[in-house]
Image (cartoon, rainbow, N blue to C red):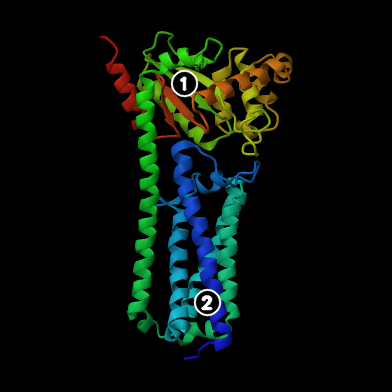
Amino acid sequence: MIVPKQTSWRWQLVVAAVLSLIGLGLSLYLTRQHYLFIESGSPSACNFGGAWNCDLVSSGQYSELFGVPLSHLGTLFYLLTGLLAALGLLRDSFRTYAHGLLLVLAIPSVLVSIGLFALSTVVIRAVCLFCISMYAVNLGLLLTTLVAGRAATSALGLIRWSEVLRSPAVVLVVIGSLCGGLGSMLAIRHVLESQRLATKLAAALAAKEIVKSEVKSGVPPLDIPSAPSQGPKDAPITLIEVSDFECPFCQKAAGLVEELLTLYPGKIRVVFRHFPLDEACNPLVKRKIHDHACSAARTAYCAGLQGKFFPMAKKLFGGAAEEDDHTPLAKELGLDVPMFSRCLLSPEAHSTLLSDISTANQHGVRGVPVIFLNGRPVKGAQPIATYRQIIDEELAKVPR
């Protein structure tokens, strides 16, 4: 069996181990952010606006395989490559196996990276900087292994794979990677679930005093007469939707609201308040996240002045929010287009958005979507059972 030269094999395995650690850190962050964004709508640190949107890529509809985040499959991969590199450094007799196995893993990882990059740019039309960093790590692993020379490239033909598969060291590496990957995912879910339950408990306790606290603190209510609303004024459930038309999970939440209206006919009144994650009109946003969110919010506001807020909102949530010109939508809905166009540039439209943002912020909104059910906040696009449980609890309080 060919063995790498003493002067070359060690540094290559060291580089492979370092790259694996970098990839592991990136994959763990994206896995945590995947669940965090779904739970609360909290944006990633690598959202820079426009096409640079990590959440759209790492938490969108193509971000899971059989219910497992793709980023977490990366966690398993980097644990495996890191342990192989470490074992090759610690045991001279294993280093050729390490080079060969790393090469076997690195080649498909680069092919998968190319496929995922094409998916994000062509289908999703968004780019995740941290994902690209992981693709670069995969390419680095491949190049580092190839630079190992004959030992790496010849290992594929010289390694006795039956011995490798029976090797206790390899078995331990695989088992350790699987256990570490599963443990890290469970740990992330446990931490986020604990935070969610703590937030839910605090919200439930605060909801009992919500009216009293608003009066005492001077916090303006979310439910105001000028806010767009639909449903019976005397409905037992007031659902206040704080949202952003360009946010993918807000779009999902909007669909859930429509479903709730169908499930509880005549029992829910919906109120909408704007919270666009766009620095163009939201002073709380310090970096680009959703470039068209403010424009979409003004479009909905101006349509609302002509009695078409919710029909316009449905179109914006359906994907039209990212369009540069919403005039065709105004024509389609039969609006007075000159009046609509003047409204878009009016100070009243801008001040309404600022008022909504300020009020929502005073009610603890930091990310979207947030839905208040009789004052009880639910953050993120949760399963419909979560909303139904709260609605049923609130309806049970209504005298029959």
Kindly give the residue lying farthest to the left in the view shown.
400
Query: Alpha-carbon distance for marks 1 and 2?
Result: 56 Å
Evaluate whether residue 384 shows in this view. Answer: no
For the C terminus, the image quarter is top left
Residue 158, image x, y percentages: 46, 87
Please tell me whether residue 182 is drawn above or below residue 140 in the rendered image. Answer: above
- Left or right: 71 with respect to 206? right
- Left or right: 234 with respect to 353? left
Residue neighbourhood size for the residue with mark 1, other residues' Cα within 10 Å, grouped as few (<14), some (14–19), many (≥20): many
Per the image, the residue denoted by label 1 is: 240
Kindly give the residue lying farthest to the front in the view shown.
216
Callout 1 secondary element: strand
Residue 205: quadrant of the picture: top left
Q: Earlier in the sequence, mark 1 or mark 2?
A: 2
Evaluate whether residue 241 shows in this view. Answer: yes
Please tell me whether residue 267 is drawn above or below residue 366 in the rendered image. Answer: above
* Residue placed most toward the observer, 205 or 169: 205
Kindly give the residue lying farthest to the bottom in the view shown.
1
Residue 200, image x, y percentages: 37, 31
Q: Residue at x 53, y 72 (%)?
A: 16
Q: Residue at x 51, y 29 (%)?
A: 365
Q: Nearer the viewer, mark 1 or mark 2?
A: 2
Per the image, the residue denoted by label 2 is: 13
Callout 2 secondary element: helix
Residue 233, image x, y percentages: 44, 9
Residue 359: quadrant of the picture: top right
Q: Residue at x 55, y 35 (%)?
A: 247
Q: Amino acid at mark 1?
A: Ile
Residue 272, image x, y percentages: 52, 20
Q: Amino acid at mark 2?
A: Leu
Residue contact at pointers 1 and 2, CB within 8 angstroms: no
* Residue placed most toward the observer, 323 or 332: 323
